[in-house]
Image: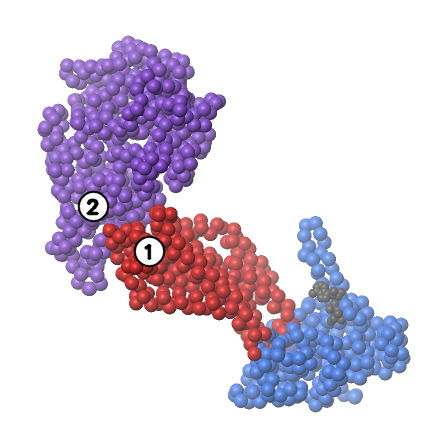
Amino acid sequence: MGHSQLLLSVEDLIIHYQSRKSTLFTKPEIVSAVRGVTFSINSGETLAIVGESGCGKTSIVMSILGFVKPVSGKIKYKGTDIWDVTREELRGIRRKIQPVFQDPHHSLNPRMTVGQAIEDGLWPHQYEDMIEKQNGVLELLRAVRLGKEHLNTYPHQLSGGQKQRVCIARALAPNPELLILDEPLSSQDLSIQATLVNLLLDLKQKKGLTYLFISHDLRIVRSIAQQVAVMRDGILVEVSDRDSIFNNPQHSYTESLLKSSGLL
Amino acid sequence: MVGAVIVLIIFFSALGAPILAPYDVNAQNLTMSLQPPSTSHLLGTDVYGRDLLSRLIYGARVSLGIGLSAAFIATTVGVFVGVFAGFLGGWVDWLLMRIVDVLMGFPRLVVMLLAVGFGTPSIWLTLTVLGLLAWMEVARIVRGEVMVIREMLYLKAAQALGLKRSRIIMGYILPNVIGSVIVSTTLLIGTMILVEASLSFLGLGVQPPNASWGTILNQGRVDPVGAWWISAFGGLMIIITVVGFNLLGDGLRDLLDPRSLT
Amino acid sequence: MKYIKHMITISMVFLFAYGSENQKNSLTFEKEYSEEDIVDGGTLVVGIMGDPEALNPLTALSKYAKDVVSLIFRSLADINADLNSFSPQLAKSWLFSNDGLSITFNLRTDVLWHDGERFTAKDVIFTYAMQTDPGVGWDGLFYKESIRAVKALNDSTVIFEFLERTPTMLMDAVEGYIVPEHLLADITPNRIAEAEFNRSPIGTGPFKFVKWKTQQSIVLEKFNKYYIEGKPHLDRIVFQVVSNNISLWQQVRSGDVDLMEGVPPRDFVKLKDDWAKRKTNIRPITFLGRQYDFIGWNLIDPDHYATVMAEAGDEEVDLDRLLKPNKFFGNQKVRAALTMAIDRSAITELVNQGMAVRMDGPTPIIWTSYNNEANTIWHYNPDLAVQFLNDEGWVDSDGDGVLDKDGLKFSFEMATNIGNERRKQALTIIQEQLSGIGVEMIQKIADPGLLFGRMLIPRQFDAALIGWEVGLKMDLTPLFHSSSLLMPFNFTSFRSQEFDKLKEAAKGNFDRTATQEYWDNIAKLLSFELPYTWLYYKMENVALHKRFKGTVIDKRGTYINLEDWWVPHEERTEVDRMAPN
Ligand SMILES: Nc1ncnc2c1ncn2[C@@H]1O[C@H](COP(=O)(O)OP(=O)(O)OP(=O)(O)O)[C@@H](O)[C@H]1O
Ligand SMILES: [Mg+2]
């Protein structure tokens, strides 16, 4: 893959949360969620970030999506610092980076039908007329193995797995290059996890997508990622290709993770 | 939907007042002053010998009209301010909420007295002042809801889709606050009817000889015991209506809940 | 403009007294008791609806303050129920001089102030000086206008000298309570409003001041050295401040309050009924009081008046230029039409529950000069009213139900003060009756201060439904004479050469029939001209616990003989036995 192109690079990212407002008498309480993280993803690749709950994975995602401003560090998409652009430019970049969140139940607007939700992801001028637009929506639904019958259903009428498929379809709507999957499977049953993994692999191939895949389940990571970053307490302790991580872990934390999931 | 039925009945009797009212609403008959309910005057007469039933029916127009319009004004302003404050956050939020705090600190009645005292008392002035004094509560409720919605994942997803703010507000925020807005609006209608009544009590609301439930209630003061029917029926109309709107509000909340849309 | 500035006070008291023997209005209720039964002791609790502003006769303005003052202080003589003759008080007797221009008073020598000092002629001289001092601002000043000087011949003799002979000389001389020279002489007249004395008064009356809790109560006690032997009988008078007449009436019924003036008409009707059936201990007392309500029409154009006044600034204004006739009410036939459109009898009956008398002309019914025969009576006649208006060019040319003339709709505001249910009811009835003849009237209910200060006094109104408090001095000059045109009381801006002429001709005329003729002419003129549409003269409704005996309550007031009131032992209550403190 010699000619693969650098899509996203994260350099020395530091994220703090201010958990309490400072007053005259109390200092603000600072939570240091991400403490200097550097990694990059090449186009067409899948990078997985693994680590236990609370280590800062979602914080990185939110920062890449432009929701949480980092204290320092750079997030560059195709060389453009996403925290150093106009609102218009950011809107354009955002459409190329689409998230799928862990909790599908809160990821869909309860007042919108599946059709409407997906439709919102299509550029208004992408399709000539309503019918074409409708076809676009149907196509996306089919891509995630849902059908026409789901077009006019509301989220609360769907199962968790179906919801997550809708979320994926919505994320695909603007023709993104990078999909950020923040533990997309962890709220699903095992059987559904398997089908969703297959779906994701399938889509990646068909659409030539790049994945940033967040997980704490090493088995799934092994089946989906080329690159793996192991995170602990806001720091990446080890970044390497899949085989090195699984066969030859360098860091003791990686080792203990593998052990606890029975992979070592 | 008991609430809807009550509200509809009152609404249609207000609309059909000229047909339904048995007597000319303002016609006095001084020899029939304070007649108790009878077959000729089903709900009795007031001190001027005017038919109470007719006045209550006509009063529905004014009271409902004022209640609805004032609540509408208050809701519109409140939603507008609440959405802006909640969605934009930052100094906009800070400033708007300080304004809300200050306005809520004003005793409503005093402001009303001043406003109505300076202008010429009229239905329109009353209504505008009522509406403009009641929006703060709505703004607070809406702001709170918006702050919650702003943190919801579906909103993040929508933002990630690069949607315009207007689309986010119209498609994602408003539909999700509408439930609580409708409930607070229906409650407000009831409150506004009551406030109009107390304003009329001070001679500042609806100008005589026009009837509103408030002015009718006041006329009961002439002789609360001897002429019980005035305060009783006037009060009853207000209570029924307020309860009706509250029931309607509850009903609408359930109806608008997406979980009930199948 | 000058007048307006310093006349914003709204105490409307003009009085009159003179003439008439056959008034037997005093209501006494003594039947079962004789002189020998009278015993001392007892407490009277009076409910009042406002805290007095001062208990000094020179500065008291409100009715409540004047009521309390009337028990603590005494004047030279008191007017009798005939509103003509006087009874001696601080003066034992008096004598007119031969030229009729002065009166000599012989003072009592046995009178003590409540602090033990002796009352003398010096106090009378001092009181007159204070009453007429512009710095004091006494509200009865107009009584003293024809007095030239007051002199003491010795400690017990004073002479009042007059500028001219008038029928009211004696009343003018004795009006006003005598205040103590020895306590007030050191106070600069224009600082009298701040004097300590206002809150701890010392008088010569039957009751002495004990204490005053602001907004709560005032306590008076029997003055043991009162100059009339054996008086007063009651030990104590408590004035209880109650915020409104509804809760006051409640307290009267519960027995917490013994005496209340101004019982609401409907409650009073019920009380009378209960009393007749012996179901209550509260005695209803009713009599022609001192108040009447009327509609005053603004006879001049308000905008024009304001413009001319503003232009004039502090300079003298040209009255002829100032008084441009009002576009509605400048016309006598229009006023007559409006008067005929109003069923004044029905209003009188309904809003007062029968406790009022319809009024057709300017003379208050308690005045001896009252003669309804002299009045032009505009009976209720809406058809004739319409015809009158049509004759004057007011027709409904556009079919909207409201008359118009030269493009002007007959639509105007009628104002009244806030908080008076009786007037509000009258207004609502009048509104409906006027709408019946195609005249649109809009009710304007205003704060009293606003009504007088911003509307009536600066003439910025169309019509007003208000009431006057009737004085005992018979004089309509302040209301209708051209000399009062710019003054607050002639707020309709009535100007009539005939009225002025009648007034001039009557001057110095003491002949009884001639005087009555003068009053009849005045009544005839004004009831025809209708600067006012008079509505009704009110009865006063007083409720008094029945244990009080020897009471005389009439148009002169509720407290005129309080020193004679007494309570039989067998009827005493907790309150009467209350230990003095
Ligand atoms: N909005 C916030 N305000 C304050 N602290 C926060 C906020 N969001 C996250 N944190 C804290 O930052 C740290 C990192 O949180 P983050 O959500 O990034 O972890 P995570 O690795 O995604 O965990 P999980 O596997 O549970 O999703 C945690 O300690 C968390 O409590
Ligand atoms: Mg997370």
Q: Give the chain letter for red.
A: B
| Amino acid bearing label 2 | Ser
Of the numbered discs in the image, which one, if any, rests on residue C345? Answer: 2
Name the quadrant of the N terminus of chain A: bottom right
Kindly state the secondary structure of the residue where label 1 is placed: loop
* Chain C as rendered: colour: purple
Of the numbered discs in the image, which one, if any, rests on residue B37? Answer: 1
| Amino acid bearing label 1 | Pro
Residue C556 quadrant: top left
Q: Is residue C266 left or right of residue A50?
A: left
Residue A120: x and y in percent read 58, 80
Residue B216: x and y in percent read 36, 54
Kindly state the secondary structure of the residue where label 2 is placed: helix
Q: Nearer the viewer, residue B5 or C415?
A: B5
Q: Nearer the viewer, residue C562 or C335?
A: C562
Answer whether residue C23 is visible to the viewer in this image. Answer: yes
Q: Is residue C475 left or right of residue B1?
A: left
The residue that appears at 23% across and 56% down in the rendered structure is C435
Answer whether residue C19 is visible to the viewer in this image. Answer: no
Q: Nearer the viewer, mark 2 or mark 1?
A: 1
Q: Give the chain letter for blue.
A: A
